[in-house]
Image (spheres, rainbow, N blue to C red):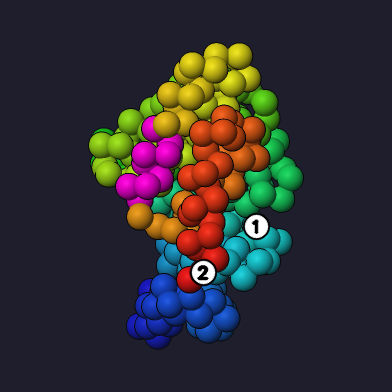
Amino acid sequence: MSHSAAELLNRARQAHQEERFTDAKRDLLAAVKICRESGPGKALAVALRQMGETERRLGNPAGALRSYEEAVALMREDTEPLVLAHTMRHLGDVHQEQGGPEQARPCYEEALAIYRSNEQSHPLNLANAIRAFAAHLYDADELQRSAPLWEEARNTYRSLGIHAGVAECSVRLARIARHQSDDQVADKQLAEARTAAEKSGDDEWLASVAKAACQYEYSEAQFLPFAKKKVEKTSSR
């Protein structure tokens, strides 16, 4: 990678972290142009993956798909498997968000297979890939198949102290139990979701979980006082 391209990518990363996505895209366009002039390879793949992430944050799913798909094609030729897995998962997310579950599924399956087979996989990356596939199956009404994946992801999030992840998985498992008319298990899962949400200490995230819980029609009598308190606290910030 030429020095100027590396400099542009570093600057784009900084802008992305600061949520200056328009600035990040400007630098990425320049970096991609430089990398293309050097020919296809890992440098261009990395720049395109970063572009995909930025396009997604800018609300441009078509641009994100183009960038991710080209990045994946290049990564199959010359890159580390875990980098490919990470990109495949995000490509699956964009397909899923844009109403393309048929295109999303093989992306999730491949990403998860790579993470599971690679001893260097970070537990959080694996948990995120499991969670993404579980959500895909859940949205496809394959609740039974998604349940053990939610359990597995939750166990990892719990071991890492990722309370937000524990709460989301518990909410989903509560919904599955309710679908099976097992109110006792559903209430137990919901109680864990509430505890984890409170431990997260993030008011905006708490309000989001509370809203999701209400949408999933869990025990409103138990959850709504908690939800109302958190939503009111968030809106007053």
Instruction: Note whether 32 is above or below 139 in the view shown.
Output: below
| Magenta-span inclusion, residue 61 | no
Which residue is at the front of the view, 212 or 230? 230
Q: Main secondary structure of the magenta part?
A: helix
- Regarding residue 30, the answer to whether it shows in the image is no
The residues bearing labels 1 and 2 have C-alpha atoms spaced at a distance of 37 Å
Magenta segment, which residues? 192-200
- Tell which tag, 1 or 2, sits nearer the viewer: 2
Q: Residue 49, position in %: x, y?
A: 50, 62
Instruction: Note whether 51 is above or below 133 in the view shown.
Output: below
Sequence-first tag of 1 and 2:
1
Q: Residue at x 30, y 37 (%)?
A: 158
Mark 2 — residue? 236
Snapshot quadrant of residue 220: top right
Which residue is at the front of the view, 9 or 79? 9
Q: Residue 92, position in %: x, y?
A: 59, 45
Which residue is at the front of the view, 59 or 182? 182
